[in-house]
Image (tube, grey):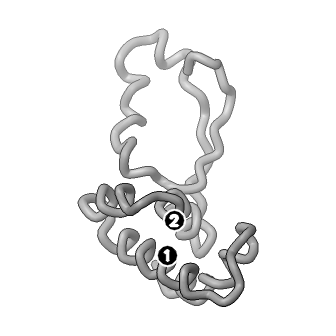
């Protein structure tokens, strides 16, 4: 809002920001400056976007996610185990998606 970004493309809902979509209702100035949004992504790529932040932490985001999205927290834990146990490191998003594709496609 402060940076006056025109459009925000959302990969996935972030449980730490639940309710933020109501901020434009505060007043007309916030509403006028509020960016348009597109997304979130659906399907396997949406699932990947949802768990991606959890894969780069010590588990604090997964624990936070357990409260609002337990299935996604479970997916994040399974994905982290899969990546950690891989013979080839997931140095790119493409490689991580290859390693996780079957897990991502099983989710709704």
Which quadrant does the N terminus fall into?
Answer: top right
User: Front-most of 74 and 39?
Assistant: 74
Above-or-below relation of 28 to 85: above
Residue at disc 2, secondary structure: helix
Residue at the image point whose x is 33% and y is 60% from the top: 65
Tell me the residue at 68%/75% (across/down).
90
Against 33, residue 22 (above or below) is below
Residue 45 horizontal/vertical position (percent): 63, 69
Would you identify the image quadrant in which residue 95 lies? bottom right
Residue displayed at 57% across by 80% down: 83
Residue 43 horizontal side relative to residue 95, left or right: left
Residue lying at 37% horizontally and 22% vertically, measured from the top left: 25
Percent from the top left, x then y, of residue 30? 47, 16
What crowding class fits label 1: few (fewer than 14 Cα within 10 Å), some (14-19), or many (20 or more)? some
Please rate how many residues cluster around mark 2, counting C-alpha atoms within 10 Å: few if below 14, some from 14 to 19, many from 20: some
Q: Do callouts 2 and 1 mark residues in contact (Cβ within 8 Å)?
A: yes
Which numbered marker is on residue 55?
2
Q: Position of residue 57 (x, y in %)?
A: 46, 58
Residue identifier under label 1? 80
């Amino acid at each position: 809002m402060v940076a006056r970004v025109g459009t925000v493309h959302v990969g996935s809902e972030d449980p730490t920001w639940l309710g933020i979509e109501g901020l434009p209702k505060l007043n007309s100035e916030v509403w006028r400056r509020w960016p348009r949004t597109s997304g979130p992504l659906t399907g396997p790529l949406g699932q990947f976007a949802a768990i991606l932040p959890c894969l780069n932490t010590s588990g604090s985001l997964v624990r936070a996610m357990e409260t609002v999205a337990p299935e996604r927290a479970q997916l994040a834990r399974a994905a982290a185990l899969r990546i950690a146990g891989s013979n080839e490191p997931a140095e790119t998003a493409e490689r991580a998606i290859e390693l996780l594709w079957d897990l991502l496609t099983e989710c709704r």
